[in-house]
Image (cartoon, rainbow, N blue to C red):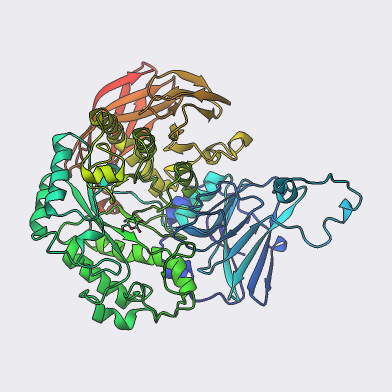
């Protein structure tokens, strides 16, 4: 067991595979920030408590798990927060419909409530048995114990809480050696901070990325795009990013990566028009390269041995494939002003009727097999494009449908074709354990109420995205797809539009607060969106809360889904202020709230300073946020805004400021800037104290 960073230990057993997330991902651990974290100085698990064995399948690792330990993490787990007593397979999948571990972004990393974390560096479909079984003989003492006859499945097979210690058993196929990393806490937040800092620190999106995103109808043509774009501006609907879906290309499924001249006869002029209206443009694509693509011939030697949707699968573990892809994207899109991409279909399908993706036994010229490539493709795809943006010194916030281990520093947000609203909320809660960002995107809605409830969630999430790829008109005009296509609108669409507009404005007013939370993610590793149990690890009431979360350090968000008129919200210890009404609540207890439409339950922690901006319609490169500083309670903690140009990587060279907001005992506000960024992104017009 070797200490490799402050609070991080590495255990090597046997000869690990050459291919692993760590060998493929170019991470640069944030050494200085890791050094600043308090560390106890001992590995959280003693080497004598770990058993590793070669098996006929590969490797078995057995790690201790104490009776009361709760297990979190494993990436974007949409179906469960607390994995104690469950089996999780780390296998990437596009339709993770059940609680099996399959996920758009599975990560072989778990966090224990006992205050440590374990990362197993494998790209294989590893299975984690989180205290599911006792070892042979352990139940002998139960010999004479009576048990009544079970008459329901749940009584017969239901999960039984551990009576005594169990273990974490990890099964890794096709592997003869492994590197395991242990992260100290002292608590779960500390563990996650270390994991994120080890991965290079969290990402800071460009400021515009935190605004509202609208992805337009897949079959839209030039004039449809312009009509939508103009209407948003005429109606003062805040929208920052305009997204194009597959129809922009001559071929999608597989992709040509070329603009379709029929639908977009002069796409450069259209882009110019969009840029002049201050939109950023994001293009949908996937990784499979159609024979008509200019990249096709060059990529042949650097692709896997099976096609998908008649297209090549580039081997992004090879420099050559990355460069060909990067060059095309730079020349055709990024140099033309495109701000980002939606990297679709880089997960794999097993549970839906389809013939994709490549088989697990596929071979790639770099030496990866299909299994490893499936688990790595999302991450490799992200880094291939991120490198281009880095070289251009332009930040992006983009989308991706698959990710994995050590991806904390990637400015990509995950999404899914699943659509259960509660599952989507759980995604926000869970992704924070594993360095991932997740969008509970709004795609369609059953009713106007459903639409508003979903928009409420999305504006209090990492990514305020409306993915309207199936409807030509905005959903606030009509949610029914057929009627929307026929142009039959709600009688009261103005009311619905107003509710949406007001929620979008709320999002815009939160950008400086969110931006600071992301900067905190970068420099301290604290995820901007996280489960309550991370902030309140000693409160068992928070262990299983998967429908409310912390957004930044001061906001607790409790979304509500359509059809429910009230919900229970547990407020942890301390006092909490209702964001909308300023009513004060005592924590340590639950309350029932009946939120009106458009007003999701949101609470501000007592003794917080919250910067709220006058809502812009979009974030321009030179926008200045006009801030009202809200002060909650007596002796609030200082708040630090992050100030830089919002679009380049110059902050990595030290060109940023921390703007300290304080409230002194004379009840006066103070603003103090420190740092080397000469520009000003914030002005302070007003202080309000509660
Ligand atoms: C799906 C993707 C959707 C949409 C669609 C377009 O795979 O998840 O968001 O982009 O493709 O074909």
| Vertical side of 687 occupied by 367: above or below | below
Is residue 312 visible in the rendered structure shown here? yes
The structure residue drawn at horizontal position 35% and vertical position 54%, both measured from the top left corner, is 412
The structure residue drawn at horizontal position 10% and vertical position 59%, both measured from the top left corner, is 268
Q: Position of residue 68 (x, y in %)?
A: 70, 45
Is residue 153 or residue 89 the one in the foreground? 153
Q: Position of residue 179 (x, y in %)?
A: 57, 68
The structure residue drawn at horizontal position 60% and vertical position 76%, both measured from the top left corner, is 176
Q: Which image quadrant: the N terminus?
A: bottom right
Left or right: residue 7 compared with residue 491:
right
Is residue 26 visible in the rendered structure shown here? no
Is residue 685 or residue 136 the one in the foreground? 136
Figure disc tally = 0
Q: Position of residue 8 (x, y in %)?
A: 55, 57
| Vertical side of 484 occupied by 297: above or below | below
| Vertical side of 146 occupied by 87: above or below | below
Q: Position of residue 17 (x, y in %)?
A: 53, 76
Is residue 654 or residue 408 the one in the foreground? 408
Left or right: residue 653 compared with residue 529:
left
Q: Of all residues shown, which one is farthest toward the right? A: 144
């Amino acid at each position: 067991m070797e200490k490799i960073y402050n609070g991080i230990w590495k255990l090597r057993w046997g000869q690990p595979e050459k291919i692993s997330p760590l060998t493929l991902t170019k991470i640069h651990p944030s050494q200085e920030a890791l050094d600043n974290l308090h560390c106890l100085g001992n590995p959280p698990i003693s080497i004598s408590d770990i058993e590793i064995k070669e098996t006929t399948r590969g490797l078995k690792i057995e790690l201790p798990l104490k009776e009361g330990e709760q297990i979190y993490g494993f990436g974007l787990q949409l179906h469960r927060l607390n994995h104690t007593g469950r089996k999780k397979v780390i296998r990437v999948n596009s339709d993770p419909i059940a609680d099996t571990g399959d996920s758009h972004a599975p990560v072989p990393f778990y966090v224990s409530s006992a205050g440590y974390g374990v990362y197993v560096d494998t790209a294989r479909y590893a299975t984690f048995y989180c205290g599911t079984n006792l070892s042979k003989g352990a139940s002998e003492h139960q010999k004479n114990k009576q048990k009544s006859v079970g008459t329901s499945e749940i009584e017969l097979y239901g999960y039984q809480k551990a009576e005594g210690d169990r273990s974490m058993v990890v099964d890794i196929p096709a592997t003869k050696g492994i590197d395991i990393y242990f992260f100290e806490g002292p608590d779960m937040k500390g563990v996650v901070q270390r994991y994120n800092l080890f991965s290079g620190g969290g990402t800071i999106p460009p400021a515009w990325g935190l605004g509202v995103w609208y992805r337009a109808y897949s079959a839209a043509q030039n004039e449809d795009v312009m009509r939508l774009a103009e209407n948003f501006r005429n109606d003062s609907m805040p929208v920052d990013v305009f997204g194009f879906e597959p129809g922009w290309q001559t071929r999608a499924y597989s992709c040509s990566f070329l603009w379709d001249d029929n639908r977009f006869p002069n796409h450069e002029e259209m882009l110019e028009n969009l840029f002049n209206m201050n939109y950023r443009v994001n293009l949908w694509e996937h990784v499979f390269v159609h024979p008509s693509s200019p990249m096709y011939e060059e990529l042949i030697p650097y692709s896997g041995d099976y096609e998908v949707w008649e297209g090549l699968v580039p081997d992004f573990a090879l420099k050559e494939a990355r460069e060909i892809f990067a060059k095309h994207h730079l020349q055709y899109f990024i140099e033309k002003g495109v701000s980002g991409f939606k990297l679709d279909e880089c997960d794999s399908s097993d549970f839906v009727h389809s013939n994709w993706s490549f088989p697990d036994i596929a071979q790639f010229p770099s030496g990866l097999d299909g299994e490893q490539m499936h688990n790595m493709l999302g991450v490799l795809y992200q880094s291939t494009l991120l490198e281009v943006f880095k070289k251009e010194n332009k930040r992006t916030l983009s989308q991706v449908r698959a990710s994995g281990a050590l991806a904390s520093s990637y400015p990509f947000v995950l999404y899914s074709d699943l659509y259960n609203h509660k599952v989507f909320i759980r995604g926000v809660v869970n992704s924070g354990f594993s360095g991932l960002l997740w969008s509970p995107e709004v795609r369609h809605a059953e009713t106007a109420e459903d639409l508003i409830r979903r928009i409420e969630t999305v504006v209090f999430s990492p990514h305020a995205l409306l993915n309207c790829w199936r409807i030509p008109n905005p959903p606030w005009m009509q949610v029914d797809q057929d009627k929307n296509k026929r142009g039959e609108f709600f009688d009261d669409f103005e009311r619905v539009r107003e509710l949406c507009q007001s929620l979008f404005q709320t999002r815009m007013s939160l950008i400086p607060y969110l931006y600071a939370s992301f900067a905190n993610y970068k420099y301290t590793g604290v995820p901007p969106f996280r489960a309550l149990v991370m902030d309140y690890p000693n409160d068992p009431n928070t262990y299983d809360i998967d429908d409310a979360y912390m957004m930044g350090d001061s906001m607790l968000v409790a979304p509500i889904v359509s059809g429910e008129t009230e919900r229970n919200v547990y407020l942890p210890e301390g006092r909490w202020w209702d964001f909308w009404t300023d009513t004060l609540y005592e924590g340590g207890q639950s309350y029932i709230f009946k939120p009106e439409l458009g007003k999701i339950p949101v609470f501000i922690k007592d003794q917080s300073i919250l910067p709220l901006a006058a809502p812009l319609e979009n974030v321009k490169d030179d926008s200045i946020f006009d801030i009202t500083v809200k002060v909650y309670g007596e002796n609030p903690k200082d708040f630090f805004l992050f100030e830089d140009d919002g679009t380049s990587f110059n902050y990595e060279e030290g060109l940023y400021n921390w703007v300290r907001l304080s409230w002194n005992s004379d009840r006066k506000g103070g603003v103090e800037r420190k740092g080397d960024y000469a520009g000003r992104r914030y002005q302070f017009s007003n202080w309000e104290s509660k």
